[in-house]
Every structure is written in C-alpha cells, then in structure tokens.
C-alpha cells in the first residue's frame, strides 16, 4: 500500500517545520542579543539576598547556587547577603572589584516588596546594578521575583528592564512554590526541594551563557 500525503498534511508539516525554524532562530537571536555575550571574564558570581545565600536549605550545599555550581562543574562565588534590599546591594556593588566576572546572577527585589519600597526606586536601583556589572564586561543573568502575591506588579518591570539592558532573564523563580509546604521552609524561603526547582529553572539559561 502506497502512502500519499494530502495537501492538508503537507500544509500541517510545513507549519511545524516553520515553527521549529522560528524557535531555533529566536533562541539564537536571543543569546546574541544578551549584552557582553560571549564574555571574556573568568568568574561566575551570584549577587543578591537571602535566596542567593540559600536561607531555608538544610545545608549550604542544598542552596540553588551550590546546586548550579555542581551542575555546571564550575565554582560560583556567592555574594548573597540576607535581608538586602536593592539599595543595600547597590551600596556594596564594589565587592565585584575583587573578581573578573563573566556572568553575574542577580536576584533582588523581594525585600523591597516586603519593606514597601516604591517600585520606581526598586527598579532604579536594579538598573544601576545592571549597568555597573555590564560596564565590567560581564553578562547579567537577571532572576525575577513576584512583587505581589495577588497581582504581580514586578513582572512588567523586570521584563522591560531585561529587554532594555539586554540581560539574560528567568521569570519569577519562585513561581508555584509560595504557599506549598512541599517546596517552602517558611513563608518566604524555599526548602531543599524548592531550591532544586529554582536550580532547574536557572540551569539551562546559565549553561547556555557559558558556551
């Protein structure tokens, strides 16, 4: 029995091929549009608050930064400070002077929300942090967090910031974790399983920036 493709089948196949081509073209262009990619730096740095520190994990090796370090097979310098707002982090940005950053993972904003810092101030500080890092020749991998449990006021701001300053970006790394005791150690911080989820979300983007 001879199989013959109908015009409709060919049309569907053509659409699928076009979608696949567009997907890979978008992925390529997206990486090419990340500022300073590929970076000539040598150090991978994580810069942020208690989520970078790994508060809530049973031990330091269970933090998502430690998990990422093992998966990429490279050390990640942890410059997290619990309780940091974007203003606090901006005031210590010169800690990067000790290193030659290739990629800097930035995770901030949660404490701004908890302390009711005006959104404009939060993202003004983040802009300054990003520009400082990029001026060093490093890639910024920006990790988003929610600005409100009911309506995420941070999401459009993070997206605009990432687009305007050409950062790599992972949207709302805590998505689906809040309020779920399977993934959270308290109301704010993930447990080991939660940090594993965050590492799973960040790893594909980070590993791609290192190629």
Image (cartoon, rainbow, N blue to C red):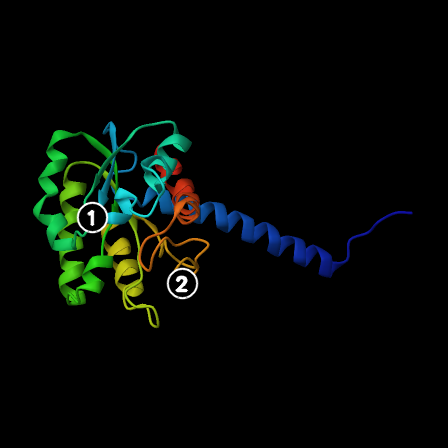
- In the displayed orientation, state which residue is furthest to the bottom: 150
Q: Does residue 141 appear anywhere in the picture?
A: no
Task: Please count the marks in the image.
Answer: 2
Which quadrant of the view contains residue 206? top left
Residue placed at 30% from the left, 65% from the top? 156
Residue carrying label 2: 179
Q: Does residue 145 appear anywhere in the picture?
A: yes
As rendered, which of 69 and 128 lies closer to the eye? Answer: 69
Residue placed at 10% from the left, 44% from the top? 92
Residue placed at 56% from the left, 52% from the top? 18
Name which of mark 2 and mark 1 comes first in the sequence.
1
Residue placed at 28% from the left, 55% from the top? 163
As rendered, which of 125 and 186 lies closer to the eye? Answer: 186
Question: Callout 2 environment at 10 Å: few (<14), some (14 to 19), or many (20+)?
Answer: few
As rendered, which of 21 and 184 lies closer to the eye? Answer: 184
In percent of width and height, residue 142 lies at 28, 49
In percent of width and height, residue 78 lies at 24, 37
As rendered, which of 176 and 124 lies closer to the eye? Answer: 176
Element type at marker 2? loop
Numbered tag placed on residue 43 in the rendering = none
Element type at marker 1? loop
Residue carrying label 1: 82
């Amino acid at each position: 029995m001879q199989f013959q493709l109908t015009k409709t089948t060919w049309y569907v196949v053509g659409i699928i091929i076009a979608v696949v081509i567009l997907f890979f073209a978008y992925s390529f262009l997206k990486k090419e549009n990340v500022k300073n990619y590929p970076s000539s730096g040598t150090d991978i740095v994580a810069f942020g608050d208690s989520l970078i520190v790994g508060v809530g994990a049973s031990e330091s090796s269970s933090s998502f930064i430690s998990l990422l370090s093992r998966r990429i097979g490279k050390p990640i310098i942890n410059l997290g400070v619990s309780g940091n707002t974007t203003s606090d982090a901006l005031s210590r940005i010169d800690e990067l002077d000790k290193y030659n950053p290739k990629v800097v993972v930035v995770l901030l904003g949660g404490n701004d929300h908890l302390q009711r810092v005006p959104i404009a101030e939060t993202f003004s500080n983040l802009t300054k942090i990003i520009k400082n890092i990029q001026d060093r020749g490093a890639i910024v991998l920006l990790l988003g967090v929610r600005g409100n449990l009911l309506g995420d006021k941070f999401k459009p701001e993070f997206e605009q910031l990432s687009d305007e300053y050409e950062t790599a970006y992972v949207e709302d790394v805590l998505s689906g974790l809040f309020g779920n005791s399977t993934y959270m150690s308290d109301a704010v911080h993930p447990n080991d399983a939660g940090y594993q989820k965050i590492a799973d979300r960040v790893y594909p983007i980070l590993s791609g920036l290192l190629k």
